[in-house]
Amino acid sequence: MTDESNSAASVAKSLADRVKNPVVYRLPGMDKVRVISNLRYGGVDNPYLLMDVYVPPDLKLQEHRPAVVFIHGGAGPENKAKDWGIFQSWGRLIAAAGMIGVMFTHRFSPPPASLLTEAASDVSAAIEYVRANAASFHANPDRIGVCAWSSGGALLSALLNKRPGFLRCLVAFYAMLDLQQYAPAGDTAASQVLKSFSAIAALPEDASSMLPMLIVRAGRDEVPMLNDALDRFTATALKVNAPITLINHPSAEHGFDNQSDDEGSREVIRSAIEFIQTHLGLRGAMT
């Protein structure tokens, strides 16, 4: 095996180990959350495109809560990101905080960039499924937030462009918000695709009525050029007066929410939940 192959295998093993860990913040009731597993949310013939829904315990029969849809990074559906410890615990955490947590797998697995289009279709299908079946999940179809991690940030651009009325807020955890920097020199077609999946390109000239958006930055993010893109998005968003909130964890690396068990990480996670609760109408619901 070549040195390059050994390096790639080492990175893959490291990722597999890291994603097993749960989130470093907990709330009472996480262990009592009800989980509805392995729902087929779309019409695509792919056995790995599945969804799990996390429902708060002890809901009344006719009670409906806002929903939070999670978008994982470019792992590919066959790697079953919804079953990773980080996202299972995020689902339980959101449900324990009084909301419906929704985790699903999508097809984005870079490269190639063309799978972004398929993944965007998966995101739309997942949200439509949640809204269509909201009653069975105790969800309010008109109060939905979306939270994306890492390269999953590329799938937020369509939501910024369309801004559907039921969508109330966005959260980006150490997310890629400008893919244009990865376009091969001289490849116009690739540049256009990557631009269409760059949140920065979706910002209007006057963004004052844009969806409220929380950006969580890992100060020591080791993913090449990720913070450059995130900082560029933030600067542009402020220039066009977008309603963004930025939280920077100065000492954090990529994936800190399930890797760095320190008060700084816990404070960031707590603040993110409070942001979501506020914009989904559950202000003051945290325990």
Image (cartoon, rainbow, N blue to C red):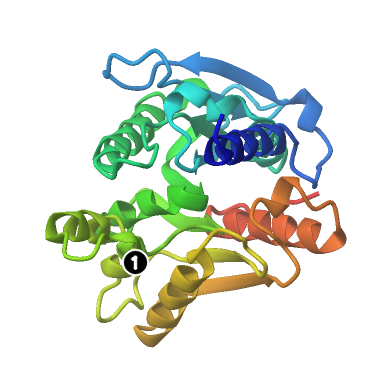
Q: Position of residue 185 (x, y in %)?
A: 23, 65
Which residue is the extreme one toward the left? 188
For the N terminus, give its image quadrant: top right
Residue lying at 86% horizontally and 57% vertically, measured from the top left: 262
User: Which quarter of the picture shows residue 243?
Assistant: bottom left
**Residue 201 falls in which quadrant of the image?**
bottom left
Q: Nearer the viewer, residue 100 or 224?
A: 224
Against 4, residue 57 (above or below) is above
Left or right: 195 with respect to 240?
A: left
* Residue located 66% across and 70% down the image: 219
Could you tell me if residue 118 is visible in this image? Answer: yes
Which residue is labeled 1 in the image?
A: 181
Q: Residue at image x 58%, y 72%?
A: 246
The x and y percentages for residue 2 are 55, 35
Q: Position of residue 273 (x, y in %)?
A: 66, 53
- Position of 193 relative to 26 (above/below): below
Please give the name of the residue rendered at 55% of the width and 58% of the height, measured from the top-left corner: 223
Does the image show residue 64? no
* Residue 173 screen position, x and y as percent: 57, 56
Q: Where, by quadrant of the figure, is residue 130 drawn?
A: top left
Q: Give above or below for 36 relative to 2.
A: above
Number of other residues with Cα within 10 Å of mark 1, as a class: few under 14, some 14 to 19, many 20 or more: some
In the displayed structure, does residue 251 sit left or right of residue 175?
right
Q: Which element type, helix, strand or loop, lies under badge 1?
A: helix
259 and 42: which is toward the camera: 259
